[in-house]
Amino acid sequence: MKLRTRILGRMLNAEVQEYLTRSDLIIVPVGTTEMHGGLPLDCETVASEAIGLTMAEACDGLVLTGLPYFYAGATATGRGTVQVSVRQGIDYLGAIARSLLRQGFKRQIYISFHGPAHMTVCPMIRDFYDETGVPILYMDLCMQLFDKSADLFLTDNMAQDPAAAMRQIDAMFLGAYQIMGRLQDVPCTTAFAQAGAQSCTPFNDLFNLAYQSGAVGYCFGENTDHAPTTPIPDEQTRQELADRGQQIIRQLVDRMDLPHVADQLQGLAAYGLENEARYPWMPSSWHKAHS
């Protein structure tokens, strides 16, 4: 069924009620507001929202946008960065998840293009299941992109042009702004094109002992540590990058096979109910029995 919009906050309550009579799937992009070279502070939020909207269109879901303030991590040295603790983020996101479940969204998919977001989302996912018995999902977009779709950033002349991959990634950010109707928010600038070693590089042997900023606490020493940005000298270049990036996003979402993911979530819920019947000491079963 054709919806006027899939973004929850832009829908009428009556439209949400009608949607919930036929489906129960919502995608929740978890963002951040942090320094990011020549891109706006909310670029990782916008990337998550644009990918989330494209995902929703692929599997007849809704999208809950407007979650830009979570744990930023090493970018806390930026004056524009908004830093929220991991624990605060877990509690806030858990409250949202419980509210969505009460309203009828039994299938919830959380996504983020912010690397350290897993530290906030994953504990919430597991605690939520123990409390409610409802499996909700986290899809790490960095993992989906760099581990499973790295070829989208590879070009035939990578050896001669090592900045080509960075251009593809930045194109994806611009494509996200275009999808969300905000391309004009990206400034035309060439001031952030420098790509050198990060000031914290000598400590990589520590950082690499765990996944995505989870090994040890630290902050970037220089604003240029995060992140060099492809030169955008004029509006024509900006448009060309955005068009290319929008295509990358569509290719990425196609590879995710969202209809299959949505079906798997439904099947996993049924599997969980069978297990609860067999193991009544499971926390979710106990809560249901005493509520």
Image (tube, helix red, strand yellow):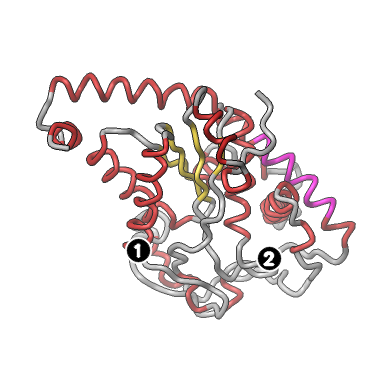
Q: Which of 52 and 15 lies nearest the eye of the viewer?
A: 15
What residue lies at 77% left-to-right and 57% top-to-bottom? 183
> Is 3 rendered above or below residue 126?
above
Q: Quadrant of residue 19?
A: top right
* For residue 274, side relative to residue 204 (left or right): left
Q: Amino acid at mark 2?
A: Leu
Tag 2 residue: 39
Q: Nearer the viewer, mark 1 or mark 2?
A: 1
What residue lies at 79% left-to-right and 71% top-to-bottom? 190
> Is 112 rendered above or below residue 209?
above
Provide the residue span drawn in magenta: 239-251
Does dot 2 land on a helix, a strand or a loop? loop
Q: Earlier in the sequence, mark 1 or mark 2?
A: 2
> Is 173 rendered above or below residue 275?
below
Q: Is residue 240 magenta?
A: yes
The label on residue 88 is: 1
Q: Is residue 245 magenta?
A: yes
x and y percentages locating residue 54 in the rendered image: 64, 37
Is residue 159 in view? no
The label on residue 154 is: none
Q: Amino acid at mark 1?
A: Gln
Q: Which of 66 and 77 lies nearest the eye of the viewer?
A: 66
Tell me the CA gap for discs 1 and 2.
26 Å
